Amino acid sequence: MRDYIAIYSDSTHLPQKAIQLAKILSEGFQKEICFLSYAANTTEELQFRERHQLWMQEGGFTAQSFIRTAGVSTLHESLTEIEAAFFIIELSSRNSSKEIQYHLNNCKQLRIPYFFVKPEITSVQFNKVLVPVGFLTEEKEKGIFASKLARFCNSSITLLKAKDYGSKAERSVNQIQSLFEQLDVQCEIKQAHKDSFKVQLEASLRASNGDADLIIITSSREYGLDDIFFGPPERKIIKTSGVPVMVLNPRPDLYVLCD
């Protein structure tokens, strides 16, 4: 059983919006909150613990502190070790592409959902969740976590179906609907204006205009040359989004044998 809602904590940034998001998940899923930090030495480790304690006192909540010295490159191992269910990253006010890419690279191996949230977001809530659905096999994974938010956080779910010529996006929507019916989860379906390659960005723009409080996207399976030089699509989505973004990494076992 995965026990923690983990918040990434660096040496300078008070992740207020990440804490708000963690409280919603903690209440809904009945899991503890923890801070995860990476210290360069014992002095910095002590500073992290003192900082976390101060945040808890000021925010009126309790959380565990996990301080690691092996470096953030071991993020996957750290989150596996503490049995985290979700991981939350609050970006700095700079919201730079370089910062977002740094975190995306560190999260590439994660098998749990991870969230990006910005400090300027005025209200963190999960009342309305928008799920863009394209033609890829892994799209059905979005349905699994959307259903969890519906059941445990009382979120209303909207599926945004990509405007494709083929039937694969329709198939993905039907698979998610079938899952929802089994779990007695209600959803609304809307037709997107964009195809599967752009539907996630469209969802971000719609949410930023008030259609949703949260969007669920999948990351790239792997980075091609365009992604390396210009950045992957998920980076642009996160950078432009005015609401928190839940990111799911495609599981290799979902698509290796299915494409």
Image (spheres, helix red, strand yellow):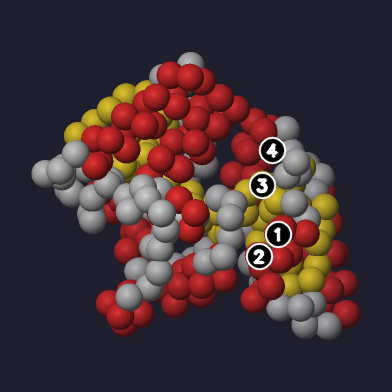
Task: Please tell me which of labels 3 and 2 falls first in the chain.
Answer: 2
- Which numbered tag is attached to residue 26? 4
Using the image as rendered, state which of residue 181 and residue 190 is in the foreground.
181
Rendered location of residue 195, percent (x, y): 18, 49
Compute the Cα span from label 3 to label 2.
Answer: 12 Å
Q: What secondary structure is found at the residue carrying circle 3?
A: strand
Classed neighbour count for the residue bearing mark 1: other residues with Cα under 10 Å, few (<14), some (14–19), many (≥20)? many
Q: Nearer the viewer, residue 200 or 95?
A: 200
Residue behind mark 1: 79
Q: CA distance from mark 3 to mark 4?
A: 10 Å
In terms of sequence position, does the residue under pointer 3 or pointer 4 come before the other?
4
Amino acid type, mark 2: His
Which residue is outermost to the front?
257
- The residue indicated by pointer 3 is 85
Of tags 4 and 1, the one toward the viewer is: 1
Amino acid type at circle 1 is Leu
Q: Which residue is mark 2?
A: 76
Identified at 73% across, 44% down, the residue is 2
Cβ atoms under marks 3 and 2 closer than 8 Å: no
Q: Is residue 103 among the parts visible in the rendering?
A: no
**Residue 20 coordinates in the image, percent (x, y):** 62, 44
Query: Label 3 is placed on what type of residue?
Result: Ala
Q: Residue at x 72, y 33 (%)?
A: 30
Quadrant in the picture for residue 256: bottom left
Q: Residue at x 32, y 64 (%)?
A: 233
> Do we see residue 70 in this rendering?
yes
